Amino acid sequence: MDGDRTISLTDVAVSRRGAMAVGGAALGSTFALSIQPVSAQTMITTPTDGLTAGPVKVKTKDGKEMDAYRAMPVSGTGFGTILVVQEIFGVHAHIADMCRRFAKAGYYAIAPELYFRQGDAKGYTEIPKLIAEIVAKVPDEQVMGDLDACVAFAKGEGKADTAKLGVTGFCWGGRITWLYAAHNPGLKAGVAWYGRVVGDSTPLTPKHPVDLAKDLKAPVLGLYGGADTGIPNDTVDKMRAALKDGSAAAKKSEIVTYPDTPHAFNADYRPSFRKEPAEDGWKRALAWFKANGVT
């Protein structure tokens, strides 16, 4: 994708007992057990040279300490700020690498462990159990508050310019990206990668992106796969229609659908990875943030 990222050419999938083991590892250094084995053939690793990168502790509004992975250029200040929102698997190695990719592009990027009150997603071996025992118990309101706490943390470090604020997320985090764009009036732009846009209203998830188009406070770029079996094309079309009738920021939003492309096409550690849509999406994301005042 660019000179700062490399693709491993090894033919052997990474063992869950090897470098990707979860127990005792630093945040962002491992992959979740439920997504093993990891595909080492296409996995992209962004080095930390020229960066300040690693785990940090973020104080939340209720006084708790939340783990997060943060990356930024080693020198300079006033960096545009990107909130990076996890997949359902928590802040594993791919999400940390996304932070480093944004840092290489000149941003301050931070990915909070948004399930920390409910449990550690990376220790689960079965996705249905992970969803039932952790993901389904995470309130949207809690997530919005924890993302706000990350903005405050970034501002407090003195390196980021949180007036130039963006958010991006993947799968579960793609949905959260749309929600945060309706939540924070200080947000400049969002990029939602294959995030669900419709769903049932529950006490923990009372509204979904299609319900919030009228409330968007920042334009969002949506990146979707035309062959995504979990997010049908007709639901994405409903979101497009809602944006046309939404707020001014909604009307500025765009949705790109890549034909014959599955869910999680940017997840280079999984068989779903598709190089061309992933590269195009990355270029579009950077251009979107630049065009909307995050740079």
Image: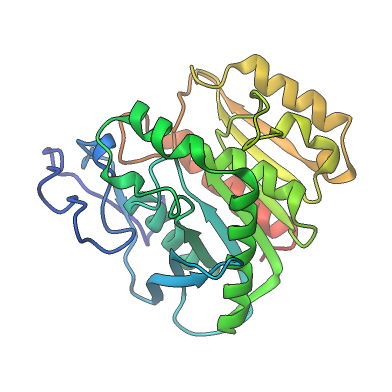
Residue 160 on image: x %, y %: 60, 76
Residue 96 on image: x %, y %: 39, 58
The residue nearer to you, when weighing 153 against 243, is 153
Residue 78 on image: x %, y %: 63, 79
Rendered position, 6 above or below 152: above
Q: Is residue 105 visible?
A: no
Rendered position, 168 above or below 83: above
Q: Classify residue 184 as left or right of residue 295.
A: right
What residue appears at the point 41 percent right and 52 percent down from the top-left corner? Answer: 95
What residue appears at the point 78 percent right and 51 percent down from the top-left corner? Answer: 218
- Image quadrant holding the C terminus, namely bottom right
Please give the count of numbered marks on the rendered protein. Answer: 0
What residue appears at the point 45 percent right and 60 percent down from the top-left corner? Answer: 99
Q: Is residue 215 visible?
A: yes
Residue 79 on image: x %, y %: 60, 74
Q: Classify residue 13 as left or right of residue 1.
A: left
What residue appears at the point 81 percent right and 50 percent down from the top-left corner? Answer: 217
Q: Classify residue 195 as left or right of residue 246.
A: left
Q: How is the image coloured?
A: rainbow
The residue nearer to you, when weighing 128 against 157, is 128
